[in-house]
Image (tube, grey):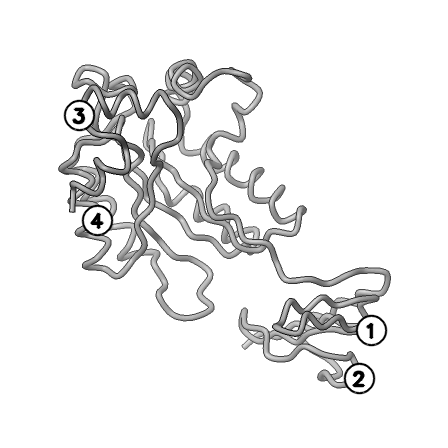
Amino acid sequence: MTTLLVKNADLLITMNPGRDQIAGGGLFVRDNAIEQVGATSDLPATADTVIDARGMVVLPGLVNTHHHLYQTLTRCLAQDDGLFGWLTTLYPIWARMNAEAVYVSAKVGLAELLLSGCTTSSDHLYLYPNGSRIDDEIRAAQELGIRFHATRGSMSLGESQGGLPPDSVVESEADILKDSQRAIEIFHQPQRHSMVRVALAPCSPFSVTPDLMRESAAMARSYGVRLHTHLAETLDEEQFCLETFGQRPVDYVESLG
């Protein structure tokens, strides 16, 4: 077991129902779980790691519920464009990324989140060029110590089949489902206070087939993991869904069951 003591904070913001604020407060952590919050004098005197928070404010960590960490390295490109124009500009660039680029991009993005007060982050990684895997992002998160909900995203509907992304960045549905199962079985930690969890995340109505939406949802239910996607982001997507499925985005996914 490992322990952490944060003590002597100028102010500790609890965000409990009473919104209590504790001057000279601190907290005691054991194995990634906060055991005690209160005045420093009421906490254990020491721990494996001790942080003297004089001159600091301690508050609950922020939670980031959606991100694309692999895009950190390309965020300066195609600015001020609409969604579909932005994507079609960047898809060919992302197609040249590899495992190292995904790892470095994730590590930079997660480090920035930590520096801004975020302690738990989700990420939606939906393309896997040149041997990259969701493992690359999970490794970056574990090295930094952030709590991480990795979503195994997917794209199967390439341009040749009526989708938006070029065929170079889509996968076969059999490969997607096989690797989704692998990621859950290797990395998902369902217990309370776990540091890594895995969810499934078919990317969007314009980049996966109805069958993959259904199969991903079925697998998520069978493993008891969360399901995530993009939906009704822009008018471009609404028009795509009307032309392709004869329904608006929310009606379309509701029809999938």
Query: Does 111 sit left or right of 159 as displayed?
Result: right
Which amino acid type is marked by label 1? Gly
The front one of 29 and 236 is: 236
Residue lying at 30% horizontally and 33% vertically, measured from the top left: 204
Residue 24 circle label: 1
Say which label, 1 or 2, has the lower sequence index: 1
Per the image, the residue denoted by label 3 is: 246
Q: Is residue 236 above or below residue 65?
A: above
Per the image, the residue denoted by label 4 is: 217
Residue lying at 71% horizontally and 73% vertically, measured from the top left: 20
Query: Does 116 sit left or right of 232 as displayed?
Result: right
Residues packed near mark 2 inside 10 Å, few (<14), some (14 to 19) or many (20 plus): few
Separation (CA) of disc 2 from disc 4: 50 Å
Q: Are marks 2 and 4 in contact (CB under 8 Å)?
A: no
Say which label, 3 or 1, has the lower sequence index: 1
Which amino acid type is marked by label 4? Ala
Per the image, the residue denoted by label 2 is: 41
Separation (CA) of disc 3 from disc 4: 22 Å
Q: Is residue 169 above or below residue 175?
A: above
